[in-house]
Amino acid sequence: MTWVRAYETNLDRLCRYAAFSCGSEGLGDGVVSEALSDVLIDTSSAETANLIALFQKLDATLERVPPGADSLFAELGRWQVLSPLERRVILLCVVEGFSARDAAQITGFDRGQVKGILARAQLIYADRFPARLGLIGGDDRVRRVIEQALRSVGHSLRWTLPADSGTDPATLPPASLVVVAQAGATRQQALDMCGGYEGPVILTYDGAAEDRLSMKHWTLSNDALSDQTLFSSMLIRALLFSA
């Protein structure tokens, strides 16, 4: 894979990594541009580059960048209490799917240090990783997609409720996150189903798009909920970046 091909294929991943590392979308885009320019003038590196090396270049640039003044962190819950290095390692391993060994190569730390960082971060997110989800509504197909997505990364579905049960999810065993899956519902109706639950929520309802409503509410279309990859991506963001 050449530098240019790796960049085009993974542009969204690079920009996401930079933005959530330094806390600013604009600053993150600038870091990606700076790292890319540096790569393109390095002919010898271009001959042997791959995805890990591309992230390695970006990470080296991020190390020199202070958090942005228009920081995203204030809206991202406990994410803001992590150190810059902890954020980068979590993004690499949890969001981008790199192994601890790959993350060590990208950041320049040894694998033991990376595992130590992940262990410390896991204490901060102890109630969310591994995730135990609650599901309100949804048919058998939706439940299967969610269970498959959870099982592949060590999470689990803790309980389910019919959409019309009237049960307040706050009275059930604690869940890391609740998914409300109700075709035909409005946004307000989907929100009402959350009852007194105070954790992160992913809502699906008629007309919903992939978005963030508030510090703890995220939305996903009914079609996207049936896609394991799209659901997994939203789940990770909701778990990491909710208050």
Image (spheres, grey):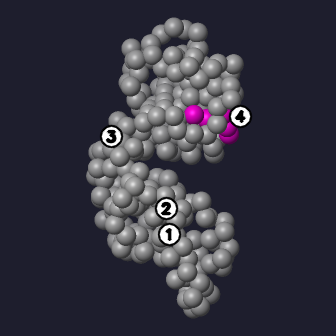
Three-letter residue code for mark 4: Asp
Q: Mark number for residue 126?
A: 3
Query: In terms of secondary structure, where does tag 4 sit?
Result: helix
**Of the image marks 3 and 1, the number of the one nearer the N terminus:** 1
The residue singled out by tag 1 in the image is: 30
**Of the image marks 2 and 3, the number of the one nearer the N terminus:** 2
What is the C-alpha distance between the residues marked 3 and 1?
Answer: 33 Å
Q: Residue at x 46, y 34 (%)?
A: 214
**Of the image marks 4 and 2, the number of the one nearer the N terminus:** 2
Q: Give 199 or 217, whichever is nearer the viewer.
A: 217
Number of marks present in the image shown: 4
Instruction: Say few, some or many: other residues with alpha carbon within 10 Å of mark 2 (under 14 / 14 to 19 / 20 or more).
Output: some
On the image, the x and y values in percent for residue 175 come to 42, 27
The residue singled out by tag 2 in the image is: 26
Q: Is residue 89 something that shows in the picture? A: no
Instruction: Say few, some or many: other residues with alpha carbon within 10 Å of mark 4 (under 14 / 14 to 19 / 20 or more).
Output: few
Q: Residue at x 54, y 62 (%)?
A: 15
For residue 48, side relative to residue 131 (left or right): right
User: Nearer the observer, disc 2 or disc 3?
Assistant: 2
Q: Does 238 appear above or below 163?
A: below
Three-letter residue code for mark 2: Gly
